[in-house]
Amino acid sequence: MYEKLHAFLTRFGLNLRHSVTNPEKNVFLSKLTDYKTGFTSYGKGENEQKALLSAYGEMCERIITRNYFEEYYINNLYPNMHTGEFLNEKLKRHYKTEEMEKEDLIDFNSDSFDILSIPFIEKSTAKTVYFPINILQNLYASNGMAFHFDLNTAYYNAKTEIIERYVKFDVIKYGLPLPKIDHPLNSENIQIYDATLNGKYPVMAASFIEDGEIILSFGCDLNREEAVKKAYLELWQTEMRERGRFNENIEEVKNSFNLYRHFVNLSGDVHVNFLKNPLFKVAKWDFDDLDVFSQEEYIKVYEANPYFALQVIIPGISEVYPVEDMIFNNINQGKLYYRDKILNYEKYPENEIYEIIDELKYSFATEIGALIGVKFNDPVFADDFEFYYKNRKKPEFSEQYINILNLSRKLHEI
């Protein structure tokens, strides 16, 4: 099942290795790594083949949509980039662009200091709308991305992911207790829930609770048992190693860092209200389609013969991070203030270089390569960079980073 995707990826020169574990009956977890780039994906399924297919599909998705490359210094990363008008008036109001400076919309990857955008199609009108790359990378992460040989199936998978995460974040942010349901998967520590929120969404949930710790997962599908299966398999994602705790402070529970932990590895905290009597009764399962939101959708399709990857954006629904992050926690700071001075220090006066060295010493504990979007042969911190500068040397890019750059170029050939 996964062999065709393996062949597809090896067209790009990837050196792939996978492993599979079976932590529970009918639960298989897979890990796929490309040793040339370091890219890693994870999969799950009720048998080994499906788990591997899941991991290979995720790696294809993240490569073709360029999601894996977002944190790197790469020019010409996306096809059909645009430097003219961007967004429409409604979207500008949603993203509050009138409160932003131009630099808030400049992308992280390229050398350009123009606002680079890529085209999406507005679903209701089929009009092209250009989204700034920096908005996509700051707010949406991998939410709403999918990969498949059938475009309709890819869209279905992307939309169910968005609905699942929307419900998850609502339940967590507002401390909503969910109605329990009887199910064969229930056990001493595991419980299945109706997460339709009174019949609004085709979503089920599962929890693992032990010693004051909790893992809470969700699954969306038009088929109820498929939604249960997705939630249950998601519960095992980290083999129960990553867990959250019950927290009485709702502000801590709903902050963006805690929600991100739920997004990444299910290790976020859950409010104690989750243990109370549910607000809703178990609802009748009656869903014919995924049109559960009234907001406009925007779709970007990447063709990779014979496959499709896509990203669906639903402003106001599919954000992983708050819009305010564009101003207060923008990912492009390493490019705006440091990258060129570090990589091309000979172009700048000595006092400017020592200013950034001081800033890096006292403002950042992060590794400099990660800050500016490159990988060096060895980790470089502020003191290391000062040594290189004094001796008029430069750290060398790692082979892994060179491979990442080469892979990004090969994507333009498909």
Image (cartoon, rainbow, N blue to C red):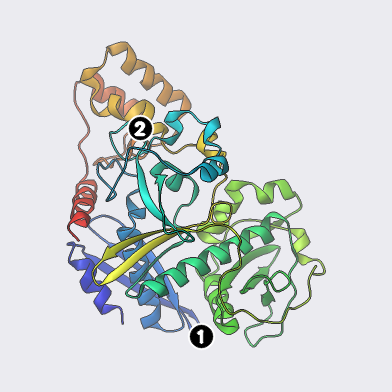
Residue 181: x and y, percent? 72, 81
Q: Is residue 381 left or right of residue 403?
A: right
Q: Residue at x 80, y 67 (%)?
A: 279
- Say which label, 1 or 2, has the lower sequence index: 1
Mark carried by residue 405: none
Residue toward you, 338 or 305:
305
Count of numbered badges drawn on the protein: 2
Amino acid at the residue labelled 1: Lys
Q: Residue furthest right?
A: 277
Residue 227: x and y, percent? 57, 78
Instruction: Identify the element where label 2 is drawn.
Output: helix
Disc 2 crowd rating (10 Å Cα; few below 14, some 14-19, many 20+) is: many
Instruction: Identify the element where label 1 is drawn.
Output: loop
Q: Eyeballing the image, is 74 above or below 13?
A: above
Mark carried by residue 335: 2
Q: Eyeballing the image, is 223 above or below 124?
A: below
Q: Residue at x 32, y 40 (%)?
A: 373
Residue toward you, 199 or 170:
199
Identify the image quadrant of the N terminus. Answer: bottom left
Task: Please indicate, yes or no, whether residue 294 appears anywhere in the rendered image.
Answer: yes
Q: CA distance from mark 1 to mark 2?
A: 48 Å
Residue toward you, 222 or 299:
299
> Which residue in the protein does label 1 denote?
25
Amino acid at the residue labelled 2: Lys
Q: Are marks 1 and 2 in contact (CB under 8 Å)?
A: no
Q: Residue furthest bottom?
A: 184
Identify the image quadrant of the C terminus. Answer: bottom left
Q: Is residue 107 left or right of residue 228?
A: left
Residue 88: x and y, percent? 48, 44
Q: Residue at x 64, y 88 (%)?
A: 184
